[in-house]
Each structure stands twice: as structure tokens, then as C-alpha cells.
Image (cartoon, rainbow, N blue to C red):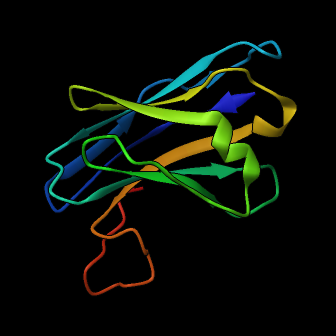
Amino acid sequence: MISALLYMGTLGVEVEQNELSWTKLLNKRVDIKCRVTGLQTTYVHWYQQKDGEALTRMLYVNAAGTSPVYNPDRPEAEHFSVRLEGVTYVLKVSAVQMIHTGVYYCACWDRSNHSDLKTSYPVH
């Protein structure tokens, strides 16, 4: 099962994920949508959380939804693509595999590096 649910706003930025969960057959496509309004940051990040594990950033894209940067420690992330539809960032998994099972979150940060707390703020 792939799941996503989130709505939060910080510093005028609102992030919303409406779909609660999906159950997909192997090799089927899934689109996970994240609506971002008031975006004044540079990057939108996608995280995956597997049962009993911490969140792991899978990839991030620039505000235009292009130039994805994949987590080199998570090779399955390269099966993902992101497109921008208005103010909605769509994470697409073209052929779901068991390795994709988890909960997915999007977040906005001022920078690609989320360890710089002086210029970054999370929107979970």
C-alpha cells in the first residue's frame, strides 16, 4: 500500500496531500499529489516512510518541478518522476513494485540541504 496524507501551513506556505491511501497491483502507475500554495522556497522534497523506519528523502525538485535530484542511497527513487500541474507537484511511480510500499510525504525547504536551520523551514 502506498499512502499519503498531509495538510499544514507554515510561514504562509500551505502543503496539502488529499489522497489517504492507494492499493495498487504490481507494475501499475500511481500519482501522488502535493498541492503547494504560497511557495516562496526553492525546493519541494519527497520523503518515504516504511513501517518501523524513519523518514527518508527520496528526491527533491526545484520550484518549477524540474531537475530532480535523487537520493543515491535509495536507487528505487530513480523510478519516480515529478511534474508540476499549476500549484500541484505530482510524484509519479510508473510501475509500482513492492520496494515502493510506504507512506509518502512532501515538504518545502529553502535549500536542497535540510541541515541548515537558519535558512530552512519544514512544512510537514
- Name the residue located 74 percent from the left edge and 15 percent from the top edge: 24
Can the viewer see residue 117? yes
75 to the left or right of 58? right
- Depth check: 4 or 77 in front? 77
- Name the residue located 35 percent from the left edge and 42 percent from the top edge: 66
Point out the image quarter for the N terminus. top right
Can the viewer see residue 4? no
| Residue 41 drawn at (x, y percent) | 21, 60
- Name the residue located 43 percent from the left edge and 75 percent from the top edge: 113
- Name the residue located 69 percent from the left edge and 51 percent from the top edge: 49
43 to the left or right of 93? left
| Residue 12 drawn at (x, y percent) | 13, 55
Point out the image quarter for the C terminus. bottom left
**Residue 7: quadrant of the picture:** top left
| Residue 100 drawn at (x, y percent) | 75, 36
Which residue is the extreme one toward the front?
Answer: 67
Q: How many marks?
A: 0
| Residue 61 drawn at (x, y percent) | 39, 50
